[in-house]
Amino acid sequence: NFPFFQDALKKFSENQISENKLKNYMSQEGFRTSSQKYEIEITIEKTRLFKMIKNRFMSTFNYFTDAEIEQGLAEINERYPDTDNILFYDELIIINASKKGLY
């Protein structure tokens, strides 16, 4: 859901662990888990986002050359052509884990 170019979205997705997989790992270690999800509305200036991507603010962007970043920014600009601000939603997942005898 992030306003990134398609190759960056793919790379970002490849490096994410699913909520269920993480909860299963915890369960295997004897933890009981529960989770809550929150949707967060984010607005960012397009120029600020572009600067952040050029500066590789997330490790996701370290996989791309400067030329690929520029091509990706053009792709984003095509998706959001007539706006100075980009609105998108992020999802925050909080996993609570407890194990008898621990805090």
Image (cartoon, rainbow, N blue to C red):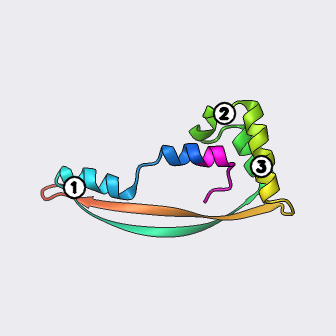
Please name the residue that numbered disc 1 is placed on: 27
Local secondary structure at mark 1: helix
Neighbours of disc 1 within 10 Å: few (<14), some (14-19), many (20+): some
Report the Cα–Cα distance between label 2 and label 3: 14 Å
Dot 2 amino acid type: Phe
**Of the image marks 2 and 1, the number of the one nearer the N terminus:** 1
Q: Residue at x 48, y 62 (%)?
A: 92
Dot 3 amino acid type: Glu
Report the Cα–Cα distance between label 1 and label 3: 41 Å
Quadrant the C terminus occupies: bottom left
Q: Which numbered disc, 2 or 1, marks the residue closer to the eye?
A: 2
Please name the residue that numbered disc 2 is placed on: 64
Q: Which corner quadrant of the image does residue 46 belong to? A: bottom right
Q: Residue at x 16, y 54 (%)?
A: 30
Residue range in magenta is 1-9
Q: Residue at x 41, y 49 (%)?
A: 17
Please name the residue that numbered disc 3 is placed on: 75
